[in-house]
Image (cartoon, rainbow, N blue to C red):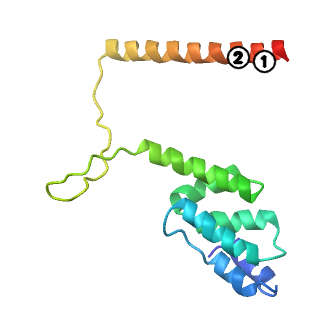
Amino acid sequence: MNNFTEELILHYEDTKGNTFFSQLINLKQKGTLVENIDNFQRLNIKVTNILDEHLTYVFIETIRDNIKHEGHLWEPNSLENVFRVVRNVENKILATRRYTTHNYKDESISALILPQFTKLTTQQLEEKYQKVFVTIVIANTIKVISAMRRNYYT
């Protein structure tokens, strides 16, 4: 436990919801993030007189380390905000993973497949760079046109 967590325990241990607060502070994500949010909210309803910034900190401490760090970096100002932030972080993490299909012969699922790095020639790198550059220019142009339309029609 870190110092801030210990301070929270000392500060809130005399409150009426003492047992619920201790359950809340000891909650750890075991399943999905959504399940953890539900568990946290169930306990949170029973705990009273806790500042929102303390609740956001306590919630972030309940989630897995790979998401916890991002949650603290965003410094969310409400529980709803922290729930949204950590869901987005989890979705980005899940989107970067590629799994193979289920292998029905030996009833096992293959491990995570990491992308294979290939060495590109100078010409191939230049072609990729040009494609990315053109894509970025087009995307930014569309954003500017959309913004201009919104400003013009409002």
120 vs 43, left or right, is left
Q: Is residue 3 visible?
A: no
Q: Quadrant of residue 55?
A: bottom right
Direction from residue 52 to residue 68 in the image, left or right: left
| Mark carried by residue 146 | 2
- Label 1: state its secondary structure: helix
Q: Between 96 and 65, which is closer to the camera in this rendering?
A: 96
**Is residue 113 or residue 147 the one in the foreground?**
147
Q: Residues within 10 Å of mark 1 (few under 14, many from 20)?
A: few
Q: Residue at x 72, y 55 (%)?
A: 80
Position in image of residue 76 (x %, y %): 73, 53
Give the position of the C terminus as an image quadrant.
Answer: top right
| Residue drawn 64% across the image and 63% down it | 60
Question: Quadrant of the image for the N terminus?
Answer: bottom right
**Amino acid type assigned to the residue bearing label 1 in the image:** Arg
Q: Secondary structure beneath disc 2?
A: helix
Q: Where is residue 13 shown, x and y percent of the image? A: 77, 85
Disc 1: which residue: 150
Identify residue type, mark 2. Ser
| Label 2 neighbour load within 10 Å: few <14, some 14-19, many 20+ | few
What residue is drawn where x is 18% and y is 54%? Answer: 104
Instruction: Please name the residue shown 46% across and 48% down the image.
Output: 94
Question: Vertically, is 5 above or below 129?
Answer: below
Asked if residue 145 can be seen in this view, the reply is yes
Q: Which of 121 and 75 lies nearest the eye of the viewer?
A: 75
